[in-house]
Amino acid sequence: MMQKTLNYVGETCDQTFVPHNHQLINVINDKYWSIAYLFLIHLFAQLQDSGKILLLHSMVMIVIIFVKFYHYNHFMHRKDKPKFIAITFCLAWQADNGGLFFGSAFGSRPFAQSLSPKKTREGIIGAFFLCFVSSLLMWVIAHYISDFLYVKIGLLDYAIIGAVSGVLAVLSDLTESFMKRCANVKDSSSFFPGHGGFFDRLDSILLPLVFVYWYMNTYLKYTFITSDL
């Protein structure tokens, strides 16, 4: 049953996100994913905290879907693949920084307290603002300083990516907060002392990563030249 479920998820992702003229790179067969997943469920069953079981189960599903999503031939052979990753991580982390700074300095009106008690409206605005401004700075750097880290695409493209990523970074953060509240745990783990778990450091990246990939793969095909890395 679990194997059929995972195979269905993989096939759905393939049909939804991959153009018909591109094939999925089967780096790891679905059967092996299923075996690994069942093994993890067995490990989770050893935990006494049902909340952590629910949270870890959800996180593993996110990783499985993302890895399947990542290993598409249409993306894996793009020359500017590292730049795509750099743009996404930089924007998401700038949203985190903007939310932290503006929330600490000017925050007074709570936002979504039931999910994240420390969130404020000012912090949300700051997250969006810094993410958007950072995207414009990326365009300046790529066009006038060096295109080593960022992609040479239009200013409007960077503006759209920055604006949408700023919103999605906040939603992504709140989504993991919601999952943690449902599981009744504060952090996904204690992997990073004082900062929570691995997913607590990547929570704001998940949704922007999907959007930036989709946007570049849909509207910016001409920008990327297919080649072997």
Image (cartoon, helix red, strand yellow):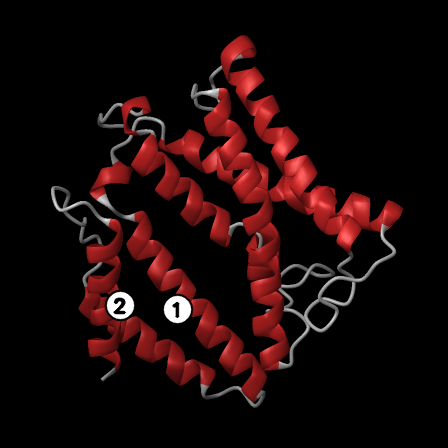
Q: Position of residue 169 (x, y in %)?
A: 58, 50
User: In this orientation, which residue lies closer to the viewer: 204 or 112?
Assistant: 112
Looking at the rendered image, the quarter that the N terminus falls into is bottom left
Instruction: Report, in whole angstroms, how far the alpha carbon at label 1 lies from the one at label 2.
Output: 10 Å
Report the mark closest to the observer, 1 or 2. Answer: 2
**Which residue bears the numbered disc 2?**
9
Which amino acid is tagged 2? Val
Report the number of discs: 2
Q: Residue furthest top?
A: 144
Q: Residue at x 36, y 27 (%)?
A: 80
Residue at 24% over, 46% down: 72
Residue at image location 33% in from the left, 33% down from the top:
219
Q: Position of residue 166 (x, y in %)?
A: 59, 43
Q: Quadrant of residue 187?
A: bottom right
Name the residue rendered at 26%, 81% in the picture.
2
Marks 1 & 2, CB-CB < 8 Å contact: yes
Label 2 Cα crowd, 10 Å radius (few <14 / some 14-19 / many 20+): some
Quarter of the C terminus within the rendering: top left
Depth order, front residue of 89/108: 108
20 relative to 217, above or below: below
Q: Amino acid at mark 1?
A: Met
Indicate which disc, 1 or 2, sits on the residue closer to the N terminus. Answer: 2
Q: Residues within 10 Å of mark 1 (few under 14, many from 20)?
A: some
Which image quarter: residue 153?
Answer: top left
Q: Which mark is residue 61?
A: 1
Q: Position of residue 120 (x, y in %)?
A: 78, 57
> In the picture provided, is 217 more to the left or to the right than 47?
left
